[in-house]
Every structure is written in C-alpha cells, then in structure tokens.
Amino acid sequence: MQAIQFFMFFEAAAFIAAALTHFGLLIDGYGHQKAGIAESVIAVVLLVGLALTWIRPESTHGAGLALRHSRYLALWSVYSRSLASVPAQCPISSTTSP
C-alpha cells in the first residue's frame, strides 16, 4: 500500500468514526444528524477514490490530489453553512448613536 492510499484509508476511517459518533452509534451524547450525513458522504467519496487507486495504480497520485481538493471544498461548504445558521453573538444595533 502506497502512502497516498494509506492516508486515504486513514481519513476515510476517521470520517466513518466521526459519522458513527454523530449518529449516536459509537458514543452517546454527540448526536448531530446533519454532521453525520456530511461525514458519511465524505467517507464514501474517499473509499471510492481508494478503490479507484487499486483498480488503476498509475492514477494514484492524481486521484489523491483530486480527492484532497474535493474534500476541502466539501468541508468548507459544511463549515460555511454551519456559520450561517449560528446567530450573531453581539449584534450591532442600528438604533444606537455614537
């Protein structure tokens, strides 16, 4: 197993563990269904990429780069959506005057 394949496997396992935690199957008290779904999708994409590197070993480097960039895009999307749903901690009132 090449280093790229090892890291894909490790990252997929980490996302699977995080998804199981958010679905309440691994550890109780950390349930969050939307996070679990997002992590499951990322884990599936990583596992598909890992399978493609075993089918076509010559494309391991390209698949690793493509998956890394798509994973960052997915994480950025999830992060930006989570920020949009959190209310501001200190809203600035437009009625106050200096």
Image: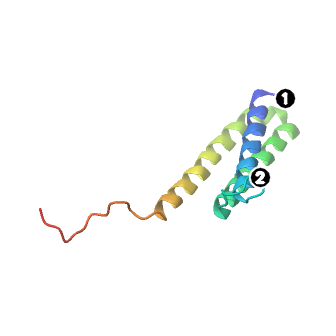
Q: Hey, which residue is sitting farthest right in the picture? A: 55
Q: Quadrant of residue 11?
A: top right
Q: Residue at x 80, y 48 (%)?
A: 48
Amino acid at the residue labelled 1: Met
- The x and y percentages for residue 52 are 82, 43
Label 1 crowd (10 A; few <14 / some 14-19 / many >=20): few
Q: Nearer the viewer, residue 55 or 82?
A: 82
- The x and y percentages for residue 82 are 52, 59
Q: Is residue 38 above or below residue 8?
A: below
Label 1's element?
loop
Q: Is residue 59 above or below residue 25?
A: above
**Image check: 97 left or right of 51?**
left
Q: Residue at x 46, y 63 (%)?
A: 86
Which residue corresponds to mark 2?
Answer: 26
Q: Quadrant of residue 61?
A: top right
Question: Quarter holding the C terminus?
Answer: bottom left
The mark that comes first in sequence, 1 or 2, is 1
The answer to whether the residue labelled 1 contacts the one labelled 2, judged by CB atoms less than 8 Å apart, is no
Q: Is residue 9 above or below residue 41?
A: above
Mark linked to residue 91 = none
Q: Nearer the viewer, residue 58 or 29?
A: 29
* Structural distance between the alpha carbons of marks 1 and 2: 28 Å
Q: Residue at x 67, y 60 (%)?
A: 31
Which residue corresponds to mark 1?
Answer: 1
Label 2's element?
loop
Q: How is the image coloured?
A: rainbow
Mark count: 2
- The x and y percentages for residue 2 are 80, 27
Q: Hey, which residue is sitting farthest left in the picture? A: 98
Question: Quarter holding the N terminus?
Answer: top right
